[in-house]
Amino acid sequence: MKTPDETDLEILRLLAENARRPYSEIAEHVNLSAPAVSDRVTRLEEHGIIRQFTIDIDRSQLRDGIPVLVRINPRLSAVDSLRQELLQAEDVEHVFITAASKIMISATPPHRNIGEWLQTIIKMENVRKYEVQLLSDIDWSVTITGTDFTLTCTECGNTVGADGTATRVGGELQQFCCSSCQTTFKKRYEKHHKEAEM
């Protein structure tokens, strides 16, 4: 597997600024042809570095609401279920889980009591307490730096270098530092898959 380089980083920076930027325009910035840029973007997608192309929506332009930042102190056993509930709520834009298992969300709920709104999207018995702060403005910036390019071996956790491999296992792309880790992971996956079918 080819290790991502500075050109890949620059392509990612340009796409982060504008995901609709034509490959011909990116090619001018990185001194490559448009087909070469297309090949690199495809490779970055195949390796799971680019997961999707998306848009940045100014929700205040789409509907009337109150931009808020909500800090939630959940019951520890409910962090994952609350996260899933919040991700499915259409008024919630971003969900963050801290290392201390606290949840922070940015959202634009309709004009009404925030507590009542929360009760409609999550199970409040899983919440110890919450705080709401009104937001006056929101800026979202995606930055790409060289340190972002550290692929990790699915099997052993080591860094994936130039001699690494990538393959789909169970429909998901996995990265491996060597063929030995790839073989070990695939054998274990196949064993668990067969046991699950019994």
Image (tube, rainbow, N blue to C red):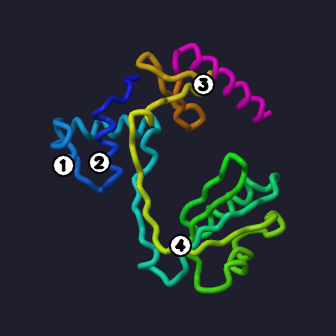
Sequence-wise, the earlier of marks 4 and 2 is: 2
Sequence-wise, the earlier of marks 4 and 1 is: 1
Q: Are marks 3 and 1 in contact (CB under 8 Å)?
A: no
Whether the magenta-drawn stretch holds residue 189 is answered as yes
**Residue 91 at least partly seen:** no
Q: Which region of the structure is painted magenta?
A: 177-198
Label annotation for residue 25: 1
Kind of element beneath mark 2? helix
Q: CA distance from mark 2 to mark 1?
A: 9 Å
Sequence-wise, the earlier of marks 2 and 1 is: 2
Q: Residues within 10 Å of mark 2 (few under 14, many from 20)?
A: some
Quickly name the residue at label 3. Answer: 157
Above or below, 88 against 51 in this view is below
Quickly name the residue at label 2. Answer: 14
Q: CA distance from mark 3 to mark 1?
A: 37 Å
Q: Main secondary structure of the magenta part?
A: helix
Q: Residues within 10 Å of mark 3 (few under 14, many from 20)?
A: few
Kind of element beneath mark 3? loop
Q: Residues within 10 Å of mark 1 (few under 14, many from 20)?
A: few
Q: Residue type at mark 1: give it.
A: Glu
Q: Position of residue 197 (x, y in %)?
A: 76, 35
Q: Residue type at mark 3: give it.
A: Gly
In front of the other: 43 or 108: 108
Sequence-wise, the earlier of marks 3 and 1 is: 1
